[in-house]
Image: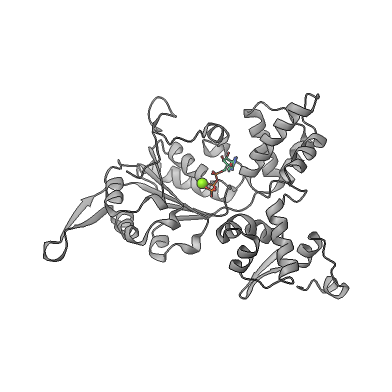
Amino acid sequence: MPIEEVINNNSEDNNNKVLKDSDNKDYVNDLRPKILKEYVGQTKVVDSLRTAIKASGARNEAMEHVLFHGPPGLGKTTLAHVIAKEKKSNLVVTSGPSLEKPADVVGLLSNLSEGDVLFIDEIHRISKGVEEYFYSAMEDFKVDFITGSGTFAKTLTFPINKFTLVGATTRVGMLSSPLRDRFGLTYHLDFYNLEELSSIIKRSSNILNVKINDMATKQIAMRSRGTPRIANRLLRRVRDYHQVNSKTDNIDDLVASKAMELEGVDQNGLDRLDRQYLLTLAKNYNGGPAGIEALAATLNEESQTLMDVVEPYLLKIGFIIRTPSGRKVTIDGLKYAGIQVRKSDDNQKRMF
Ligand SMILES: Nc1ncnc2c1ncn2[C@@H]1O[C@H](COP(=O)(O)OP(=O)(O)OP(=O)(O)O)[C@@H](O)[C@H]1O
Ligand SMILES: [Mg+2]
């Protein structure tokens, strides 16, 4: 059965995990906001979800299917857990790549109870062969399963309890439109601003029992590239550095900056791979345009990593742009990469 985790939110013990994967995810789970009130930022998404949860609750119905899309580490999985918790529903967790065989999907769907939340991570990676089973499951709450072949082929129809499908993807463009259209609620998660990141860092440092001053918090927020997962990771690295190298009680901005420099994270939050990407585009490809596959080959990296992890933030801060003919570095990107910009280019803010 392709289930990774089942969380029972309506039992006495709220965190009772019936099935759990082998990873030790405890620290991640501790830092994860559990309810909407704890969730920082994404205010429009949170407001809309709060309304949908309340309205469906008042009607005593399962909520409509929800799709979250956006770059990694912005809170898609967290929101899936929050929805199940707020609805006091069971959460069944699985992922696109593990849904390979129709029999797996039929088994998974027909085992759902009324009101369950089924979370499918990386939903863009479910195989074409099983995707169609979700169409009738999502719309009509039934699945048609074909057994045998030729003249012996038989269609068995299984009714399914009314459930809520929550899908998450970093690549919404890769979802087929029949699947995408079956989600009643679709949300794009965007990068967090400095204020939001600072309050996430404050919240996490309280949970982890780390004493940190405001300036150090801001330093971490500035280098977190708009991403809560990175903010939490940097906080843990800063905590380690402080524990070993500092005698002060509170973490100050000097300690925080030193720790993050050691990690190779600069003031803009860019790391080694980001810098290599910019330098390669600027120098090897003369500023671009360059195709993603060519860049990936030169950098010896997966194109998927570049598209999911590196590019979204470089686009967001305006260091690169995407054009039909490929990626281009901007004047700001060139300046950052330490490449001299011709005066005329600088004045006109033109591309290289
Ligand atoms: N709004 C938020 N407030 C506080 N912490 C958050 C928030 N969003 C995310 N986090 C923290 O960031 C971590 C990463 O979030 P999450 O796993 O939900 O991201 P994701 O969007 O599912 O990423 P991926 O695409 O890689 O699966 C969480 O463990 C959580 O601690
Ligand atoms: Mg996730």
Quadrant location of residue 292? bottom right
Quadrant location of residue 243? top right
**Taking 13 as reference, is 330 above or below it?**
below
Query: Residue, x 30% and y 49% (percent of image)?
Result: 104
Q: How is the image coloured?
A: one colour
**Taking 165 as reference, is 36 above or below it?**
above
The image position of residue 326, as x and y in percent, is 63, 72
Left or right of 114? Residue 156 is left
Left or right of 39? Residue 61 is left
Query: Residue, x 35% and y 41% (percent of image)?
Result: 116
The image position of residue 218, as x and y in percent, is 76, 41
Left or right of 80? Residue 210 is right
Camera-nearest residue between 255 and 109: 255
Left or right of 64? Residue 345 is right
* Position of the N terminus by quadrant: top left
> Given the current orientation, which residue lies at the most extreme right position?
343
Camera-nearest residue between 328 and 117: 328
Is residue 346 visible in the rendered image? The answer is yes
**Taking 50 as reference, is 243 above or below it?**
above
* Position of the C terminus by quadrant: bottom right
Is residue 161 visible in the rendered image? The answer is no
Camera-nearest residue between 97 and 297: 297
Quadrant location of residue 30? top right
Query: Residue, x 79% and y 40% (percent of image)?
Result: 257
> Given the current orientation, which residue lies at the most extreme left position?
151
The image position of residue 208, as x and y in percent, is 63, 28
Number of numbered discs: 0
Query: Residue, x 61% and y 43% (percent of image)?
Result: 229
The image position of residue 323, as x and y in percent, is 64, 72
